[in-house]
Amino acid sequence: MPWIRDLALIPSVAAALTAGLLVVLDDRRLTLATLAAQYLFAAWLAAASLPPGVAAVKLVSGLLACIVLSISAAALGWRAPGERAGALPTGHAFRWIAVFLVAIVAFAVGRDGWSAIPTLEPVVALGAMFLLALGMLQIGISEDTLRVGAGILTLLSGFEVAYAAVEPSLAVVALLASVHLGVALVVSYLLVGIPGASAGQEGEG
Amino acid sequence: MSAPAVIALGTLASAVLSGLLRGRLRAAAAAAALGSASIGVFALAVRLEQPFLGLGLSLKIGSTWSLLGRSLILDEGNRAAVGFLYLAAAFLFGGSWVARPGRYFHLAGLAAVGAVAASLMVRPFLFAAIFLELAAMGAVLILARPGRSSRRGALRLLALYTMAMLTALLAGWRVEILGAAGGTVEEALQATVLLGVGFSILMVVPPFHHWLPAEADAAHPYALAFVAILLQSAGLFFLLRFLDGYQWLRDNFALYEGVRSIGAFMVVAGGFMAAAQATFSRTVAYALIADLGVALISIGGRTPQGYQLAVGLLTAHAIGLAVCTLGLTVLRSRTDGDHVAALRGTGRKAPLAAAAAFAGLLSLAGFPLTAGFPVRWSLLQSLESADLASSLAILVGASVVAASALRWLGILIAEEAGGETVQPIDERIFLAGGVFFCVLFGTFPQLFAGVFEAARGFTNLLP
């Protein structure tokens, strides 16, 4: 559908905003709602390279991953853990500045598209770059299990948006969807599967 | 029926059975070991695409299993590697009889082994990266044990393997485009850099090694040994498949030189870091990094013998690490940790466990008369004077790790109050058997001949 490509700037910017918010937000409910919204925009971006029905598989698997994480977060009472002594400096100001700087770098790198993948629309490439860069930032500066999990899922989403232009086969879509669900299940297990990991006591030694 | 389907169903059945037996850890260990060994023997012995009589019926086992437009193929090129993988897993599951690494160790372990086997059989083989990610998820479940508070190492492992999957998929795509010819220099460089990053993560090359020491602090030692052996075997076979598949990669001398240099760095740095640690499990983790460095030097030699020795090192590595962590597990069960103060004198209470931990660490160092020695010796002979720096690095690394093993022996047998405690008979049998295996492979190097067969499928690397 041509309008998906024509309006690709909307999900591209929205993906950047949601990925940035994921780095900054502390509230677990908002984090998971933002992650779900991010999946919607990532699927929209992937639909520029894939048939909409196939791109919808990414959305469905992503939403399932969010549901899995939500169940675990609800079991923990939704509260984020306290900061570990000696942990990385992750105050709000630090995270906002980091998001701003990384987003600028992502924009500079991705604005002209990727010459290595000529079939990828420049606007879509920009969205993928935002997701990749901010996902890596999230993984790099977070120690909380759920936040690192969200970072990994963001990174995967960004990669899939770009990779869809390279390898649009159903097998790859299915396998990568299973990776999303697998990551969500593993993160959930790490969150609640360990006795003593209750809300606010999630020590990250 | 196809062989990959039989392997998948066998793995599933063994995993389900060991999962159902999770409340009885010894039964689960036996089920997982027997199931894994049976699948390994099947992979090695099955007659593919040839009719044979079984149960009074004419049967034929195919080699290809098609799934969602992709294929899993067991052929002469990979059956030895798949067999090796399952037999190594059976050896490790057997040791869990005593080590007791957790209720879900066997279930998650078999799932991870199945994913690695699928990565060896899948076509096109760049999809192997996705199966390696699934194996890493199984590894995280193995490492996350009840009662521990830290998940940093497990999360790092998951994040790193996800990045490895992404870079390997991209590299695979670039390599497929370049094909046999290799394209322009710039295109080949891009693909090589992507491959380098992916394999650096898979082979625990610093700075992508942080998950290993972090998990050494938190995870069950035997579970960590299982994960390390499984994931590094998968990474090594994946690397060999890439090298086997593309002539232009094999012709890239700079790549091989880089691999050798990184290997030499890992051997020396890993050795010295091992010597500087205050806990036994961290010493083992860094000795493991040094050991992996030797495997990289072996591959970097760019000789058929070097590729075979790298696979042989995997076996020595599996024996040494399993025996060492088995001994450590028993020692830790008698103390409140594995730091110097906690382990002081424990060797007098549990001498066999101390002997196993010591022998395993010596094997990781490559000390004479242990399993790690023959392959290192062959490697040193093959390097000769052609690569003096790598030879020196291996010798320095081995000496430093062996020295730290002696230091730990001194701590373990230090004079302390309290005499020898009674060890259960099965514990003694497993520990003595482990030490025996270490010495057996060190004394009779010809036992490695069968292991080298696991590399025979790489027909371009081993013409």
Image (tube, rainbow, N blue to C red):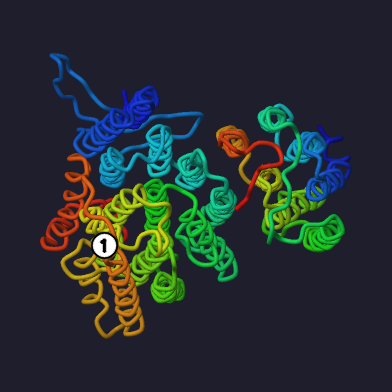
Q: Residue B371's x, y, as percent?
A: 21, 61
The reply to whether residue B76 is in sight is no
Q: Residue A179's x, y, as percent?
A: 58, 38
10 Å crowding of disc 1: few (<14), some (14-19), many (20+): many
The reply to whether residue B2 is in sight is yes
In the image: residue A4, left or right of residue B40: right
State whether residue A70 is above or below residue B135.
above
Residue extending furthest toward the top? B56
Count of residue discs: 1
In the image: residue B442, left or right of residue A105: left
Instruction: State which quarter of the image contains the N terminus of chain A.
Output: top right
Give the residue type that dot 1 points to.
Phe
Which residue is label 1 attached to?
B358
Rendered residue at 28%/70% (across/down): B410
Q: Quadrant of residue B344?
A: bottom left
Q: Quadrant of residue A50?
A: top right
In the image: residue B406, left or right of residue A203: left
Q: Residue B339's x, y, as percent?
A: 42, 61
Q: Residue B110's x, y, as percent?
A: 38, 35
Question: Which residue is more in the foreground, B33 or B21?
Answer: B21
Question: Which residue is more in the foreground, B263 or B456?
Answer: B263
State whether residue B126 is above or below residue A101.
above
Question: Which residue is more in the foreground, B94 or B251?
Answer: B94
